[in-house]
Image (cartoon, rainbow, N blue to C red):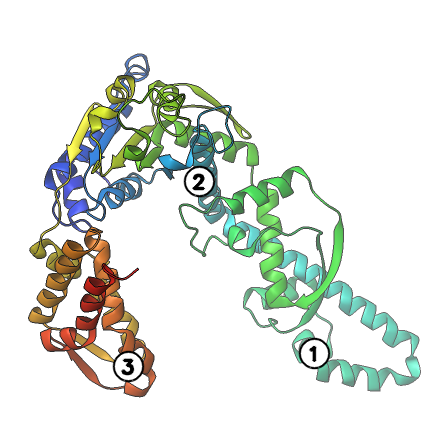
Amino acid sequence: MTVLTPRSIVEELDRYVIGQQEAKRVVAIALSNRERRRKLPPEIRSDVMPKNILMIGPTGVGKTEIARRLAVMMDAPFAKAEATKFTEVGYVGRDVESIIHDLVEVSAARVYREELKQIESNAEKLAIERIASYLYQQLTRRSKQVAERSQQVSASISKVSKRSPSLKGKGGTTLTREKLAKLLASHKLEDQLVEIEVGDSEPPASAFDPRLEMDIDDDSLFDEYYRNFRNPNGQKKRKVRVKEARRILTREEANKLLDFDQVIDEAIRKAEENGIVFLDEIDKICGPKLDLGRDISGEGVQRDLLPLLEGTTVATRYGPVKTEHILFVAAGTFSRNKSSDLIPELQGRFPLRVELNPLSQQDLERILVEPRNSLIKQYEALLATEGVNVVFTEDGIQEMARLAVLMNEHTENIGARRLFTIVEKLVEDLSFTAPERKGQQIEIDAKYVIEQVGSLVRDENLGRYIL
């Protein structure tokens, strides 16, 4: 999205999250204000703080998805944390500052991947030059061996030509570095063996290859990259095919071209200015005050969160990170307590508060069909790879939604997540027999749904009374 207006943000959220219009409007305004802040003069910009958001609603209604989609729209570093994983400072367990550490790791991995995309072509050119040089050295050594055995010159040349016809020039002349580089650029020597020199410790392949997608939560790749950069090891020789050598040396050359200090500075800047932290299960660390000593997993954690929310500087291994302009989105069901049970200071740090509604049967029907990544579309595409055309009828979709509501009412209400259980059970037999059904069209109607999933509902009801 090029322009982040409140209306465009809501429209984008509508493509992935059904209903919850009030929540969408609140987060859209908060996100737009962050964009507006960027246009302010520096002397005013520093005083405009983000308006943190508290989302209240049952599980499975879209709280996490809304926060995650906000980060995707802003192309911003995003970190998710469960409040129950933290303990008060001074006790065994994670302290809340680790949230900022995780956010910076994610930011560094994102910036790193973006930088790699820009230098990939240059790194590959340098790698091709190195491979051409290695191949040229191999041919030179081979020629010397042939010269030393002058009585077998003809036989030796014939053997070389038969083994590696691609390494012999026109008219029987030896290839130059330039000609080898041209052949390598056109991928004509991919299966040729070549001996190369590489560093002792190689970072993961997916970290170096910008064409491979990196998950927004995967921060370990940049971490290992960074450590290898700071602590380079010696060189070692490896004998591999040209195709593999191209991949290895492209990674190594990319590593040399990157300015890691600049990558880290940019990563910290993006985390400070654009970072979004989603703090889930915040209702689990609050409750009625009891005079039973210090609650290291509750009120103490809330008090530790206060400095992060109001603005502090956290020391990370990449450098100090300021939290003044990081957007915090907290969420909880508050089914056994109220948001007012949070300590007053923490409540004041979440000025925007919105309640999300439970999902109706009509909402679940829309969730199955409308979102771009809906379950129905996913399974249709998966089974289509086996040549099976699956068609979900309207009454079939209605029946799935009805059963999901029924199961949520009689057991634990897990919202839209119940649809995963139903759809997975529904297509279980199809997925297993798909290779044998190639070319068939399967219609999934209400009758089919009841036949496949009806027993699951009965088992759920019975399971409530069986120990």
Kind of residue indicated by mark 3: Gly
Against 102, residue 450 (above or below) is below
Which quadrant of the structure image shows residue 376?
bottom left
Q: CA distance from mark 2 to mark 1?
A: 46 Å
Against 366, residue 448 (above or below) is below
Most foreground residue, 455 or 465: 465
In the drawing, what numbered circle is on residue 387? 3
Q: Determine the secondary structure under disc 2.
A: helix
Kind of residue indicated by mark 2: Val
Say whether residue 79 is visible.
Answer: no
Percent x, y of residue 344: 25, 18
Please indicate whether residue 445 sits to the left or right of residue 340 in the image.
Answer: left
Q: CA distance from mark 3 to mark 1?
A: 42 Å
In the drawing, what numbered circle is on residue 164? 1
Name the residue that disc number 2 marks: 106
**Image quadrant in which the N terminus is located:** top left
Most foreground residue, 88 or 271: 88
Which is more N-terminal, label 2 or label 3?
A: 2
The reply to whether callout 3 and callout 1 are in contact (CB within 8 Å) is no
Say whether residue 108 is visible.
Answer: yes
